[in-house]
Amino acid sequence: MGDDPGRARLVAGADERLRERIKELGCLYAVARIAQTQDLGLEPMLVAIVRTLPQGWQHPDDLWVSLQLDGHEYGTRKSGPTLQQHIQVESEVRGTLAVGYPEDRTQGPGPQFLTEEEQLLERLAIEVATIVERQEKRERQRLFEARMQQQDRLNVLGELTAGIAHELNTPLGNVLGYAELLMAGEVDKERRDDLQRIIDSALTGREVVKRLMYFSCEMPSQFRMQDLNGVVAGVLRLLHRQVEKARLVLRTDLSKTLPKVRIDRVQVEQVITNLVLNAVAATAPGGELLVSTEAKDGAVYLRVEDTGQGIAPEHIRKIFQPFFTTKPPGVGTGLGLSVVHGIIKGHGGDISVESRSGKGTAFTITLPVE
């Protein structure tokens, strides 16, 4: 009979340890279930893990959880007794997983943290690192597939546009040539005006064909060392009347210490022309247009900035896609920025855009310096 109380304590202790193990296994199982919800994205998964973790500890109602990853924190870190594990993704420490109790919590009998809970936190940190690694691999795969699909579409589109450009060139040349012949012998003002409209329309069509040929890489490139400031100044002189007609203030800030860059002058002139005319079209009278250049970090930067209506956020990612345009039908072809993008990439450079609705847009072109 004297052994009964001791036996009862042993049984009670075994039951308590069993309940703790069940809670820990339940916590691991819940995290594994969260890992299966990968389509939700990484951030919702991390938030769900933080909410789930307390169920694996002795005192879940008092436990706080903090998950820090790449400078972002999920949960709230507080002072008091703490357990912590590094989150290591592909041999790189990216954050920490910590649990603890508030300082003002009344300490009960026994240790604050069980040895099994320390092991549990270590396993959970490994599980979180695995989830992060899988999600990042999925994202890299998705981006790679998207780039490949885009490249396939561009290849097919390039072949198609090259054929269209060649087919259009001959009839447009005929229209333009005959219209100019008629203009040379015409004295009636109204007829001359009509012929001028034909000539202007043919020139516009030829410009579209030229853009198609640039897009399909049918126009041979002629790269030479050039002064980008000189190219910019030449284009702005040609576009001065359009800017003046739109009643805009044109400002320039061209670096005096700009190194020469290896470019195809005709192609880069087309790039600047497209960006400036787009800025003119997007800016109301009285607005400003700033064209600037600078050199830093082994590259030359060209920036075209306006105070126009800006680009809607949902359109930002599409503006370099062929035939995408926000202009009304018959006003834009949707080829301008896709040609610009192709030309800059062909120069080994990069182009980026910043825009705020109602505030303006800025395109920045980066060209490498040899």
Image (cartoon, rainbow, N blue to C red):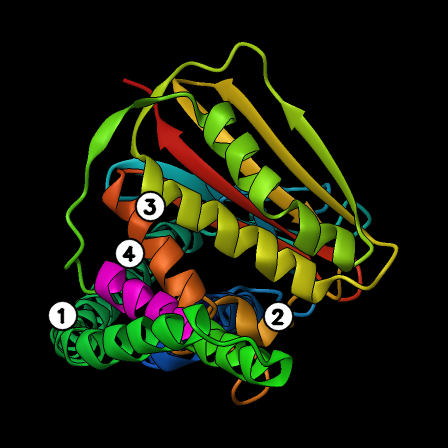
Is residue 107 at all visible to an observer of this figure?
no
Residue beneath label 2, please?
Answer: 313
* Badge 3 element: helix
Q: Residues within 10 Å of mark 3 (few under 14, many from 20)?
A: many
Mark 2 vs 1, N-terminal side: 1
Residue flagged by tag 3: what amino acid is it? Gln
In the rendered view, would you say 343 is above or below 313?
above
Residue flagged by tag 1: what amino acid is it? Asn
Is 198 in the magenta? Answer: no
Instruction: Identify the residue at image location x=46%, y=81%.
Output: 198
- What is the span of residues highlighted in magenta in the rendered image? 203-215
Mark 4 vs 1, N-terminal side: 4
Picture quarter with the C terminus:
top left
Labelled disc at residue 133: 4
Quadrant for residue 298, please give it: top left
- Residues marked 3 and 1 touching at CB (< 8 Å): no
Residue beneath label 1, please?
Answer: 155
Separation of marks 4 and 1 at Cα, in angstroms: 33 Å
Picture quarter with the N terminus:
bottom left
Q: Residues within 10 Å of mark 1 (few under 14, many from 20)?
A: few
Residue beneath label 3, please?
Answer: 267
Mark 3 vs 4, N-terminal side: 4
Quadrant for residue 225, please give it: top left
Q: Nearer the viewer, residue 64 or 346?
A: 346
